[in-house]
Amino acid sequence: MKAVVYTKYGTPDVLELIEIDQPIPQDDEVLIKVYAVSLNDWDCGLLQGDFINRLLNGLFKPRIKILGSDIAGRGETVGKNVKRF
């Protein structure tokens, strides 16, 4: 699957489209096939690496490398402890 990732803080120029392995959901997670994602000011702060976001997401490089938390999609796979969604 493809994902837009960033491995260092900066402007949108640091974003890269790469091929990544499809994640396997943990016991209490749901894997969602994403059809659309929106970026907001929180994502912009993560990308730029302002002080607070560096404390939360990695001081020198980002720990979470994929932006976007507001998504639209369809459930693909569920973990064994998921009872409802």
Image: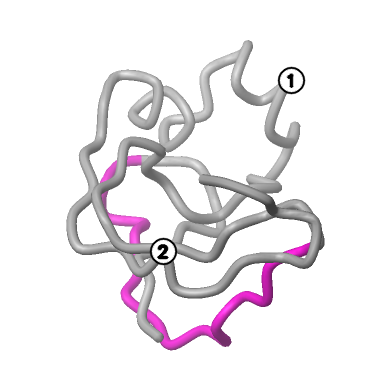
Image location of residue 4, percent across then percent down: 35, 65
Measured from the top left, where is residue 32 in percent x and y? 43, 63
Depth check, front residue: 30 or 34: 30
The residue that disc 1 covers is 55
Identity, as a three-letter code, of the amino acid under mark 1: Leu
Quarter of the image with the N terminus in it? bottom left
Q: Is residue 16 magenta?
A: yes
Which residue is painted at 58% across and 47% down in the image?
Answer: 84
Q: Which residue is mark 2?
A: 75
* Left or right: residue 80 compared with residue 17: right
- Which of the two labelled residues, at mark 1 and mark 2, occupies the earlier sequence position? 1
- Tell me, yes or no, whether the highlighted magenta stretch contains residue 71: no
Q: What's the residue at 48%, 54% (across, down)?
A: 66
State how many labels appear: 2
Left or right of 84 in this view: 41: left
Where disc 2 sits, the SS reads strand
Q: Quadrant of residue 71?
A: top left
Task: Give how far apart the Cα atoms at labels 1 and 2 are.
Answer: 32 Å
Mark closer to the observer (1, 2)? 2
Question: Residue flagged by tag 2: what amino acid is it?
Answer: Gly
Span colored in magenta: 11-26
Is disc 1 placed on a helix, strand or loop? Answer: helix
Q: Residues within 10 Å of mark 1 (few under 14, many from 20)?
A: few
Q: Kindly check if marks 1 and 2 are in contact, taking CB atoms under 8 A apart as contact.
A: no
